[in-house]
């Protein structure tokens, strides 16, 4: 009697979970495959996995306990043949206190140095490391007007900072990021409050996502025209530059200017390594040396337009009039941030946000060039062995050798 061999499937998350976010699908591995193994997939299954990522933005693979950390760099190379063999944040974990990315006090897995260790709590001897004191960053340290003590006591939290995993200097952002949950907090749900007043329950420590494709869809015709013809100058050494800045309540951008570090006080840098439009008036660097950072990127899989802007790191905008070719440079920092915030904040509604409810063993793979994400949650108690807030994750995103492609509207 013949039988059908089950293949890998990608199944969209339930409609009440996805709503209008356009995000989320679960990867159902073949019954014979307990952990993701690219060598065990057929060409058809690999194609299903690729299209699933580019169409749904976030893929969830359940029950991956015991995963070899070296699988995570393989994920980067699977979706991007030009991926470097190094984390997009650099060969070593960012530990310099002058860089805002050091605040989580993370580390790297010694047997897989492309993989970061993040989370919350004290961990002794983990992966052969003598002592880890991981910190779960909180919006209360970064937002201009954080939740009051009363609201925190009621369980409210906020997105910390919406971003892609991108250094914005020298290394190009990876196509994908993978996250693997090893230990999750055991806590009641927390809550997000949106500008409309709506409240959304989320699990403690949830990773929140929004789709750049959905963000672009929500723009008016005039805003789409503007975004399609605008490129972004990011700040040099952006994560050192913004160290003392404070964010808006939604985590989309910086609330006010004046706290940025002076460019001359940053670690050594040069304009030709900054992700930017060709900077007008600069000498000694040709335009070809600059990393173009378009506002709207083309989805590598399905070709859709995605609004991909890191609002906390923007420095200037360059807009080209498609009819005349005239270029307008906007470099007033408050104006630049206000323009970007007006475009991106439209997507910040409950129906357009996917907040992943982590289960231990989850492997989440997301399209780093198609979604933006943020950590959420208030996990700030002193940590001990029995701490219900303890959290342990692996994270990997590989620098790419391929630049993002600007979306070109038909006609």
Image (spheres, rainbow, N blue to C red):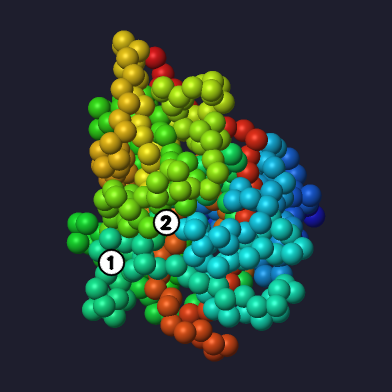
Which numbered circle lies on residue 267? none
Residue 228 at least partly seen: yes
Query: Seen in the image, is 48 located left or right of residue 352?
Result: right
Find disc 2 in the rendering and name its residue.
243
State whether residue 378 is above or below residue 43. below
Residue sitting at x 62%, y 33%: 402
Q: Say few, some or many: other residues with alpha carbon within 10 Å of mark 2 (under 14 / 14 to 19 / 20 or more).
A: some
Q: Nearer the viewer, mark 2 or mark 1?
A: 2
Q: Write down the residue under mark 1.
A: 146
- The relative height of residue 231 versus residue 348 in the rendered view (above or below) is above
Residue 198: x, y in percent?
Answer: 23, 62
Disc 2 to disc 1, how far (Cα)?
17 Å
Judged from this view, the residue extending furthest toward the front is: 264
Q: Where is residue 142 in the image (x, y as percent from the top left)?
A: 36, 62
* In front of the other: 198 or 279: 279
370 or 153, nearer to the observer: 153
Residue 159 is left or right of residue 339, and the answer is: right
Of residues 335 and 211, the one drawn nearer to the viewer in this rendering: 335
Instruction: Name the N-terminal-most of marks 2 and 1.
Output: 1
- Residue 21, image x, y percentages: 38, 49
């Amino acid at each position: 009697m013949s039988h059908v061999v089950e293949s890998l499937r990608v199944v969209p998350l339930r409609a009440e979970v996805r709503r209008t976010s356009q995000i989320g699908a679960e990867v159902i591995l073949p019954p014979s495959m307990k952990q993701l193994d690219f060598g065990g997939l057929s060409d058809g299954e690999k194609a299903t996995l690729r299209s699933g990522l580019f169409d749904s933005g976030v893929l969830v693979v359940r029950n991956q306990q015991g995963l070899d950390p070296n699988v995570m760099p393989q994920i980067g190379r699977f979706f991007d043949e030009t991926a470097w063999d190094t984390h997009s944040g650099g060969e070593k974990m960012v530990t310099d206190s002058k860089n805002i990315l050091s605040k989580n006090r993370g580390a790297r897995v010694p047997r897989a140095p492309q993989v970061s260790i993040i989370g919350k709590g004290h961990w002794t001897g983990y992966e052969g490391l003598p002592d880890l004191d991981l910190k779960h960053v909180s919006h209360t340290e970064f937002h201009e007007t954080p939740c009051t003590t009363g609201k925190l006591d009621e369980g409210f939290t906020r997105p910390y900072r919406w971003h892609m995993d991108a250094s914005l200097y020298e290394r190009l952002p990876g196509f994908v990021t993978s996250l693997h949950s090893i230990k999750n907090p055991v806590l009641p749900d927390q809550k997000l409050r949106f500008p409309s007043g709506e409240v959304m329950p989320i699990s403690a420590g949830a990773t929140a996502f929004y789709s750049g494709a959905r963000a672009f869809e929500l723009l008016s015709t005039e805003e789409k025209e503007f975004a399609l013809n605008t490129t972004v100058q990011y700040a040099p050494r952006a994560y050192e530059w913004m160290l003392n800045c404070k964010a808006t309540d939604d985590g989309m951008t910086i609330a006010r200017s004046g706290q940025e570090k002076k460019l001359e006080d940053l670690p050594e840098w040069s304009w030709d390594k900054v992700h930017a439009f060709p900077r007008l008036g600069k000498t000694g660097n040709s335009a070809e040396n600059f990393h173009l950072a378009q506002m709207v990127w083309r989805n590598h899989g399905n070709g859709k337009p995605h609004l991909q802007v890191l609002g906390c790191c923007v420095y200037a905008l360059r807009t080209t009039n498609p009819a005349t070719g005239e270029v307008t440079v906007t470099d007033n920092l408050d104006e630049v941030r206000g323009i970007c915030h007006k475009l991106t904040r439209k997507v910040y509604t409950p129906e357009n946000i996917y907040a992943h409810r982590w289960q231990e063993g989850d492997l989440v793979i997301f399209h780093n060039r198609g979604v933006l994400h943020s950590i959420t949650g208030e996990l700030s108690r002193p940590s001990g062995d029995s701490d219900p807030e303890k959290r342990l994750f692996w994270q990997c995103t590989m620098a790419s050798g391929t630049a993002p492609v600007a979306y070109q509207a038909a006609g």
